[in-house]
Amino acid sequence: MTAPVKDAPPAAAGPRRGTLAGPRFRPGESLFRWALLACLAIGIVFLVSLLAYVVVEAWPRLDSRLWNNFPSIRRPENAGAQSAIFGTIWVISFTALFCLPTGIMAAIYLEEYADPNRWYNRLIEVNIQNLAAVPSIIYGILGLGLLARQLALGTTVLTASLTLSLLVLPVVIISSREAIRAVPQSIRHASLALGATQWQTIWRQVLPAAVPGMATGAILALSRAIGEAAPVIMLGAVTFVMFNPEGLQSSYTVLPVQIYNWISQSREEFHHLAAAAIILLLAILLVMNAAAIWLRNRYSRRW
């Protein structure tokens, strides 16, 4: 008979090699976290201070005269920004009409049809990424030289809309591609296995699932376009317009240009007008961003 094996003594208390010894105090991580919080606090303080200053400056003119009256040089107490508001609506509407279908279709081609091994597809992708970082003034120079002068479109709503479309088109393409790429491949494989064509799969499965991301990117791109002043100033946007645009060939002004015109005046009343127009522009941007958030939350899916 063999001797009974004695039980092994219990292991000594304490962490073993290769196991976590518990949380340790790392001063570098704490310092980095507090530095990030300090940067965030400084940014918020400056933003709140700036908004408070603008609201205080705009308070005397935050009334219906701002959107009911046209600009005036002699009587700033009765001046308004109706022509700039309608000009902004015209320009941003046709910007969306020109750039959104083009950007979405380009994203569909690059994600679903393009062969990444082809040199021209790689060239297109590199150019799109580079164009997204080009300063807006360069697009204004391009629109002035090519659209306004070479194509003889003049300084009209059409020229401004096409120029701003070129400005935000790379952003629309990149955001749409990311939204399409986020759709799982299993959705495509299941649709193709059931006999659907590639276009039917894209139209009925991929695009509906990618709508939240595409809509968010499109609205944020248009929010950038609506606040741009440099390209439209280069295109010769009129700073004093006493009428609303009536078509694509009409002269125009937009809110950023009108704000620039008022802020350059010496009289204090024009500065109040500029601040009120800034509040109006911020309200429009806030509504557009809220719409983007609502669309993302309303139609988002979790895979």
Image (cartoon, grey):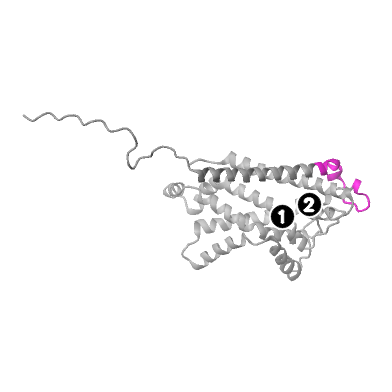
Per the model, the C-alpha gap separating discs 2 and 1 is 16 Å
In this view, the residue in front, 118 or 126, is: 126
- Based on the picture, tell me whether residue 149 belongs to the magenta stretch: no
Residue 21 shows in the view: yes
Q: Where residue 51 sits in the image (x, y, percent)?
A: 75, 43
Query: In this picture, which residue range is highlighted in magenta?
Result: 56-78
Residue toward you, 133 or 101: 133
Q: At 52% across and 41% down in the image, what residue appears?
A: 301
* Residue topped by disc 1: 94
Instruction: Tell me, yes or no, whether the two marked residues, 2 and 1, touch with CB atoms within 8 Å.
Output: no
297 left or right of 251 in image: left
**Nearer the observer, disc 2 or disc 1?**
2
Secondary structure at badge 2 equals: helix
Question: What's the mark number on residue 159?
Answer: none
Q: Is residue 158 visible?
A: no
Q: Is 73 colored magenta in this rendering?
A: yes
User: Which x, y percent locates residue 112?
Assistant: 50, 56
Outermost residue toward the right in this view: 74
What residue appears at the point 74 percent right and 59 percent down from the top-left corner?
Answer: 230
Query: Which residue is labeled 2 in the image?
Result: 255
Count of all numbered marks drawn on residues in the image = 2
